[in-house]
């Protein structure tokens, strides 16, 4: 700490690196947001300029709201993402607790098997998944997406959470057992609060790919009723003409909910880090 | 109301035998201390008594009742852990009351018991705080309070003081001794610390790699160790061991003499030697000698002494206090 303070040049360099990374990462978002408020000519003539009195236009947003059921798409995306995160966290934490807490035959093997999904992308199984969903009559339902995303998120969740749960003090769990807490209360009341930062991390890692996914909505649930935002935005991209105003506006709107979720989870993350003392 | 019988307790983790047949009787109201080197199975034994770990074979009776299959909360025990293990999200009061609440005790009863325990441990000002807002000593007192509130037949302590600093350790040790006198409850206590073991125990159980080496009162273990292991483990600095043939003694294989039972003189004595190192502790002086007959010898003298390295001195053992061990390392029965 004191070393870093005594070297202002080093600190400056670190900040410079971080700031330039932030700029690079935020640039596309900035471009999308800015251009979504401009008319079509301005987007192409001066993509970098801010919307001025002559170029400002809400035409993109108007198109998005007028065409198709965008509110419905948002709702679909939110339902799928939130339910999937909830299931991934619940089942992931439970499996991680079992793997880290109980000694049983095949424990390590089961752990490895569950972690396998981290290395093998679930999209390799798309054909089989589609056949399964057709057979189960789940095509064009949000359930099908939720099931797939839960399966997709579980391996990493189990991997990260079981490592964290190993660090929760055995004495604490044993104290709970002596005080008569059931294994469920020990899990929900003692262990989960202590691994909350890890849960928030897993939630963020799980959320982004689900919200952004185009593949599975396109294959499993392309119907009007079950379209997600990313799929909905595609209808403005045509083979010959693309309505850029609408695309940019739709994408700008799509950023908002993820940002809200992210803020919620990162709050948890910070609170967990500062208040998790066991001893 | 809190006796404990262990009969040939065995415990294995996989193929690794941790407890190898433990037999032990603890009377009601006794303060029993388990000591032994690290990894000898003290904590494992304590956890099997608590029911946190299943035994591989053997029987445990608490208060005359076989407890196999009875969950920890219903065994009438309370345990205090080395790491305190307080619930971080609960206040001190709720930490102490949780066990009773789970058992369905009435709220008024919980409040009186918590108030009584917190009075005993001077925790009253902290009842509304969370564990994170307490010092180490206060946390350990809360952990002890949580055990008291349950009014158990049997208290189990697993190295409760080892996270505290020296001064606090002495103070908490005295509190635990006072608590035992006051509650007259049966207590089982694991420690690494010799002083804790000697000062608190009615009975010390010396464990070594999963088996009991000797059970006895502190003074029995000090004066009549059953074998070389106990003789070396109890007492600090460690007993001196001398091969008997060097002293032309045929009654034993090894002779043992405690550092405090050897006297030193500059003029005459049994074993001539040279001082190697001296430690001045104020109340004691520890002198390390290299003698011609016995090799390296530790001598503990009371008070201050002016020995220096390379001084030539004579050591004389107190013949009455010699310990004799046979070729199996067991103490030879006749004590001279
Ligand atoms: N869950 C477990 N799985 C496998 N081996 C274990 C387990 N718990 C303890 N052991 C082994 O059992 C032996 C005894 O452990 P235990 O914790 O009882 O020792 P201890 O006497 O309490 O030591 P210390 O004084 O260091 O606390 C050790 O060799 C340890 O490696
Ligand atoms: Mg231990």
Image (cartoon, grey):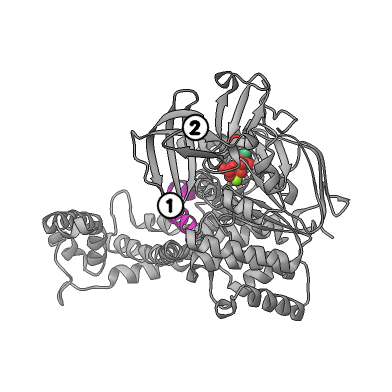
Q: Relative to residue B245, is residue B117 drawn left or right? A: right
Q: Residue B128 in the image: x percent, y percent?
A: 56, 78
Q: Chain of mark 2?
A: B
Decide: is A105 above or below B150.
above
Q: Is mark 1 within 8 Å of ligand 1?
A: no
- Binning the other alpha carbons within 10 Å of mark 2 as few (below 14), some (14 to 19) or many (20 upward) gives some
Q: Quadrant of ligand 1?
A: top right
Which residue matches tag 2?
A: B269
Q: Is mark 2 within 8 Å of ligand 1?
A: no
Q: Relative to residue A76, is residue A47 drawn left or right? A: left
Q: Relative to residue A94, is residue A255 drawn left or right? A: left
Q: Secondary structure at mark 2?
A: loop
Distance from disc 2 to disc 1, alpha carbons, whole Å, reads 79 Å
Q: Relative to residue A273, is residue A99 drawn left or right? A: right
Badge count:
2
Q: Quadrant of the N terminus of chain B?
A: bottom right
Span highlighted in magenta in the image? A196-219
Which is in the foreground here, disc 2 or disc 1? 2
Q: Residue B12 in the image: x percent, y percent?
A: 70, 33
Residue plotted at (51% across, 61% down) = A76
Q: Residue B281 in the image: x percent, y percent?
A: 42, 51
Q: Secondary structure at mark 1?
A: helix
Is residue B229 something one can see in this rendering? yes
Q: Chain of mark 1?
A: A
A144 vs B209, nearest the viewer: B209
Same chain? Circles 2 and 1? no
Q: Residue B336 in the image: x percent, y percent?
A: 70, 32
Residue A205, numbered label:
1
Is residue A99 something one can see in this rendering? no
């Amino acid at each position: 700490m004191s070393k870093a303070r005594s070297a202002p040049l080093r600190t400056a360099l670190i900040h410079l690196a971080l700031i330039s990374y932030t700029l690079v990462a935020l640039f596309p978002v900035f471009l999308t947001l800015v251009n979504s408020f401009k008319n079509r000519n301005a987007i192409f003539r001066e993509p970098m300029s801010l919307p001025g009195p002559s170029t400002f236009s809400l035409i993109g947003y108007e198109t998005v709201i007028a065409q198709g059921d965008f509110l419905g798409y948002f709702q679909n995306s939110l339902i799928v993402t939130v339910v999937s995160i909830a299931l991934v966290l619940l089942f992931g934490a439970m499996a991680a607790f079992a793997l880290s807490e109980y000694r049983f035959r095949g424990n390590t093997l089961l752990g490895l098997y569950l972690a396998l999904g981290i290395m093998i992308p679930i999209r390799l199984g798309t054909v089989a998944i589609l056949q399964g969903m057709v057979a189960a009559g789940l095509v064009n339902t949000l359930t099908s997406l939720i099931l797939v995303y839960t399966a997709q998120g579980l391996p990493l969740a189990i991997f990260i959470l079981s490592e964290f749960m190993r660090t929760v003090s055995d004495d604490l769990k044993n104290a709970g057992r002596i005080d008569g807490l059931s294994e469920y209360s020990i899990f929900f009341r003692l262990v989960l609060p202590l691994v909350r930062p890890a849960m928030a991390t897993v939630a963020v890692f799980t959320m982004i790919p689900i919200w952004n996914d185009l593949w599975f909505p396109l294959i499993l649930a392309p119907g009007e009723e079950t379209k997600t935002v990313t799929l909905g935005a595609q209808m403005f991209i045509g083979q010959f003409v693309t309505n850029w105003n609408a695309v940019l506006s739709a994408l700008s709107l799509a950023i908002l909910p993820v940002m809200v979720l992210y803020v919620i989870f990162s709050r948890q993350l910070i609170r967990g880090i500062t208040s998790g003392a066991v001893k | 109301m809190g006796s404990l019988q262990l009969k040939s307790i065995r415990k294995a983790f996989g193929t690794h035998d941790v407890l190898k047949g433990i037999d032990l009787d603890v009377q009601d109201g006794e303060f029993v201390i388990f000591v032994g080197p690290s990894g000898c199975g003290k904590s494992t034994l304590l956890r099997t008594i608590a029911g946190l770990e299943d035994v591989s074979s053997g029987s445990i009776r608490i208060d005359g009742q076989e407890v196999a299959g009875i969950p920890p909360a219903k065994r009438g025990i309370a345990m205090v852990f080395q790491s305190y293990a307080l619930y971080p999200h609960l206040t001190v009061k709720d930490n102490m009351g949780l066990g009773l609440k789970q058992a369905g005790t009435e709220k008024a009863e919980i409040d009186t018991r918590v108030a009584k325990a917190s009075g005993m441990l001077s925790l009253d000002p902290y009842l509304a705080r969370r564990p994170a807002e307490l010092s180490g000593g206060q946390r350990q007192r809360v952990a002890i309070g949580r055990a008291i509130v349950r009014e158990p037949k049997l208290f189990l302590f697993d190295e409760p003081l080892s996270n505290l600093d020296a001064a606090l350790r002495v103070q908490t040790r005295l509190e635990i001794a006072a608590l035992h006198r006051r509650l007259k409850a049966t207590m089982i206590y694991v420690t690494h610390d010799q002083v804790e073991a000697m000062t608190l125990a009615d009975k010390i159980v010396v464990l070594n790699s999963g088996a009991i080496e000797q059970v006895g009162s502190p003074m029995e273990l000090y004066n009549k160790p059953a074998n070389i292991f106990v003789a070396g483990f109890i007492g600090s600095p460690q007993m001196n061991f001398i091969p008997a043939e060097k002293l032309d003694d045929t009654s034993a294989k090894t002779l043992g003499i405690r550092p405090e039972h050897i006297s030193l003189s500059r003029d005459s004595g049994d074993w001539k030697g040279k001082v190697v190192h001296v430690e001045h502790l104020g109340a004691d002086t520890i002198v390390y000698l290299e003698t011609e007959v016995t090799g390296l010898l530790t001598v503990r003298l009371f008070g201050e002494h002016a020995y220096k390295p390379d001084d030539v001195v004579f050591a004389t053992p107190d013949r009455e206090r010699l310990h004799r061990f046979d070729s199996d390392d067991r103490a030879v029965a006749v004590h001279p």
